[in-house]
Image (cartoon, rainbow, N blue to C red):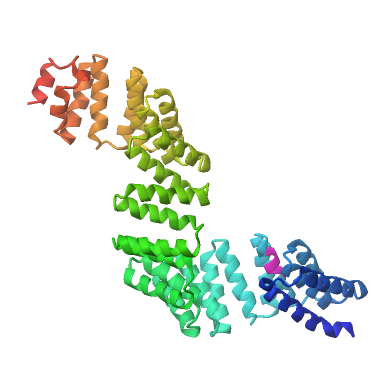
């Protein structure tokens, strides 16, 4: 009967998928689906036929059709644990984590020793940030099959997301012990060691990945990060360049290369690297900002401004970018745009002392003294220990000829930083209070 050939046909289907990189014609997969559909039409009450049709749809990425087929399978055979497991996979692949969880749990209820269902349940819990439940599910999977290295690796990832890095490393080591050629375990181990600042161990882990897969550009990139943290900048550059040689469009490696050149104060190669990062990833916020910062240092404020604007379009709610826009507009002598940018930064980050201060200084230069006082008062309320904020408040009150208030803030400023005594002597903003007996006493 055709029914008995279903498993064989499904094995052929899997072979087609495995050989996909060899450009097996897609019509072979289509033919398999057509055969399963015919069987379903001929035997609509056969749960297994619906199951295999669902698996074929899943393999082709037609997830909604896969869900329908698996649902039909379990409606016909309510104890079909394997179909519930695959239904969970189809849901999870679509980001429907709650539905996926329910399907896996049903599979486990039917078959309490169902390793794969526990494994998949752990992954869906982890994706949903229910990390304790994820750990528990992975551990149950290990109890059922302690020789599966992939579940140990996934357990390690869950521990890592919890910040339990030592336990994560133990899990990765177990995975690598079971399968010494399992590069994912070494790679993740390298990440964990890196975050623990155990740099030599991280390097060793990444080097094991490269022994097994010498063309792994991400590992070279991460190796560069470790060398950078060790301040071994030349080795970091070599590692990033290796990553780029393997993948010439690897924007992250270009960005990190730029950062390392910048650390060495080699601005021209840093600029080139950041430009390449942006070329290959036009939405790379960090590269735009870093390149803008270099141009700002070089006094090329127009170029810096354009890069910060691009970054603000990529990340509209990043207060730090709007602050940089405010500073750049200030340097370009555009106070209205500067004030607008600083206000946007404040709207996004109300506790930003720097943004309140920047706004206050711009308003002060525009002669909007009361508004400037309001902005600087906000800054000093957030952080009372900044001498420059007190000093600028003193300047404004001096301009307003409010001597007592001016001296109140001037005294605070020089208490925090005595250098402001000498600075005030040549500051024209203090002309209105310079002959005050209080001022004369304070600058002694």
**Residue sitting nearer the eye, 266 or 16:** 266
Q: What quarter of the picture does the N terminus occupy?
A: bottom right
The picture quadrant where one finds residue 24 is: bottom right
Q: Position of residue 109 (x, y in %)?
A: 68, 76
Q: Is residue 136 magenta?
A: no
Residue at 46%, 70% in the rendered image: 188
Q: Is residue 178 left or right of residue 270?
A: right
Q: Position of residue 366 (x, y in %)?
A: 35, 19
Q: Which residues are magenta?
A: 87-91
Q: Is residue 97 left or right of residue 264?
A: right
Residue 348 seen in render: no
Residue at 45%, 39% in the rendered image: 307
Q: Does residue 249 sit above or below 414 in this rendering?
A: below
Tell me the chief SS of the magenta region. helix
Q: Does residue 61 sit above or below 146 in this rendering?
A: above
Residue 277 seen in render: yes
């Amino acid at each position: 009967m055709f029914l008995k050939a279903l498993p064989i046909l499904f094995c052929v289907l899997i072979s087609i998928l495995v050989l996909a990189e060899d450009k097996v014609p897609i019509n072979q997969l289509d033919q398999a689906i057509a055969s399963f559909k015919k069987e379903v039409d001929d035997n609509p009450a056969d749960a297994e036929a619906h199951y295999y049709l669902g698996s074929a749809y899943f393999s082709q990425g037609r997830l909604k059709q896969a869900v329908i087929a698996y649902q039909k399978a379990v409606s016909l055979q309510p104890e079909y644990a394997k179909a519930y497991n695959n239904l969970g996979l189809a849901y999870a692949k679509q980001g429907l984590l709650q539905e996926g969880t329910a399907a896996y749990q049903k599979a486990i209820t039917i078959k309490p020793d169902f390793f794969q269902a526990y494994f998949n349940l752990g992954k869906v819990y982890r994706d949903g940030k229910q990390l304790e439940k994820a750990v528990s599910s992975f551990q149950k999977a290990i109890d059922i099959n302690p020789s599966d290295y992939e579940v140990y690796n996934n357990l390690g990832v869950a521990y890592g997301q919890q910040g339990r890095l030592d336990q994560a490393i133990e899990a990765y080591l177990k995975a690598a012990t079971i399968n010494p050629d399992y590069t994912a375990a070494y790679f993740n181990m390298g990440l964990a060691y890196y975050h623990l600042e155990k740099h030599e161990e991280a390097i060793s882990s990444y080097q094991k990945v490269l022994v097994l897969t010498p063309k792994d550009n991400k590992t070279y990139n991460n190796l560069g990060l470790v060398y950078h943290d060790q301040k071994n900048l030349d080795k970091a550059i070599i590692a990033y360049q290796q990553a780029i040689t393997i993948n010439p469009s690897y924007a992250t490696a270009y960005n990190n290369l730029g950062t390392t050149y910048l650390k060495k104060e080699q601005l021209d190669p840093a600029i080139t690297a950041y430009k390449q990062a942006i070329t290959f990833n036009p939405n790379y916020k960090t590269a735009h900002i870093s390149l803008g910062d270099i141009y700002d240092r070089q006094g090329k404020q127009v170029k810096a401004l354009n890069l910060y604007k691009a970054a603000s379009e990529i990340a509209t709610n990043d207060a730090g970018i709007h602050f940089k826009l405010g500073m750049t507009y200030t340097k370009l002598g555009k106070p209205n745009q500067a004030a607008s940018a600083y206000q946007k930064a404040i709207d996004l980050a109300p506790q930003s002392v720097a943004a309140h201060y920047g706004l206050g200084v711009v308003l002060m230069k525009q002669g909007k003294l009361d508004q400037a006082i309001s902005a600087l008062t906000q800054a000093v309320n957030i952080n009372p220990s900044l001498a420059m904020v007190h000093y600028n408040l003193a300047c404004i009150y001096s301009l307003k000829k409010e001597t007592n208030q001016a001296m109140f803030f001037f005294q605070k400023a020089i208490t925090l930083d005595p250098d402001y005594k000498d600075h005030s002597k040549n500051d024209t903003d203090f002309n209105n209070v310079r002959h005050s007996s209080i001022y004369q006493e304070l600058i002694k």
